[in-house]
Image (cartoon, rainbow, N blue to C red):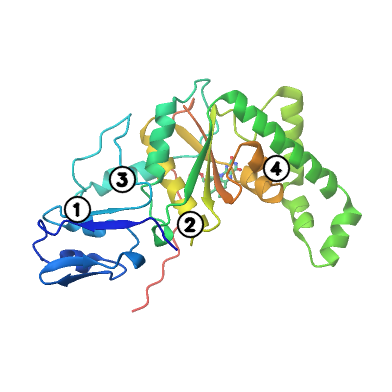
Amino acid sequence: MDSGFTTRIQKEACIGCGLCTEVCPSRVLFLEAGKAEVLEADCLACGHCEAVCPENAIKAAGPTPWLRGFAGFEIPERPLPPGEFDAGNLVGLMLSRRSCRNFRDKEVGQEVLQDLAGVGVTAPSGTNSQALCFTVLSTRQAVVEWAEGIGNFFRRLNRLAGRPVLRLLLKALGRPELHNYYLNHYQSVQGALAEWEQKGVDRLFHGAPAVMIVSSSNNASCPAEDALLASQNILLAAHSLGLGTCLVGFAVAAMKKDPSLARMVGIPTDDTAYAVIALGYPSVKYLRFTSRKEPSLRFKA
Ligand SMILES: Cc1cc2nc3c(=O)[nH]c(=O)nc-3n(C[C@H](O)[C@H](O)[C@H](O)COP(=O)(O)O)c2cc1C
């Protein structure tokens, strides 16, 4: 299959140092007559060779090469070598990000949303497949319309889960999911639906003015991991750009059971959505770090 990946070596510029052959994860680069050569068929186009070449003699690219600046911030001219970014600032950012459930009534601009998608694709992806799609609901109205669709799904689910004979019969037949849902979520979902209907309180997206759905092609080698790694990058970048975010697992679960919800917002048909991120400017400021569970850490020498 033609992946569309290309790795071009400018022979005149190549000095035959061999650094590219050392960093190539697929071992498709080799030296011949003092110049780098590539076996393109197995190349991932990960760009390690291009990034390491002291003579800038290599261009590695996927089918739709893309590298652009960001509208809201500048990136350094060169990659930061290991150890040259302040770990305290990085971990401070990680610790400062909190799930936001209190949003201001202020739209998130298109450029910011584009920047966040651009941040998403900086994440690693299995076999460099980069098969991500970012579907953005950029107005509160679009968010509310989708929330209505998801609300209808949970209304139907709660009607089923509210039937004890049905859920216990399914459980006896080895399908305990509905019973477990009843035990863990039925009551709170019932309450959230009532609040939505009676008071317009949005317990699903927490009143967010925008939502970003991160999906990945089912043909990718590690679609779930790719989408979730991209999502974490987006959460951190959003925080540094002044935005609050909240992952909404209820929306992901609803899409899994009812594919019409993914179609409703135009997610590609051969994609699966792994993360739904509520986004907006926060109306609450957090003043101190809070604790986490101690990591379970085991060493084996
Ligand atoms: C996979 C996943 C799904 C989540 N789903 C929801 C959700 O549906 N609604 C919500 O309010 N928070 C959701 N959260 C946020 C968690 O509740 C939150 O991350 C956790 O309480 C820790 O708080 P923090 O994110 O502020 O550090 C989800 C988080 C993850 C990782």
Check residue 90 in the rendering and tell me which mark sits there, or answer none: 3
Q: Residue at x 40, y 30 (%)?
A: 112
Compared across the picture, whether 238 is left or right of 274 comes to: left
Q: Mark 2 touching mark 4, by CB under 8 A?
A: no
Q: Earlier in the sequence, mark 3 or mark 4?
A: 3
Task: Where is residue 193? Give x, y as percent.
Answer: 74, 34
What kind of element bears circle 1? loop
What kind of element bears circle 4? helix
Name the residue carrying label 1: 81
Q: What's the residue type where badge 1 is placed? A: Pro
Marks 2, 3: nearer the viewer? 2
Name the residue carrying label 2: 225
Q: Residue at x 13, y 66 (%)?
A: 35
Q: Mark 2 touching mark 1, by CB under 8 A?
A: no
- Residue 30, placed above or below residue 292: below
Q: Residue at x 82, y 63 (%)?
A: 171
Marks 2, 4: nearer the viewer? 4
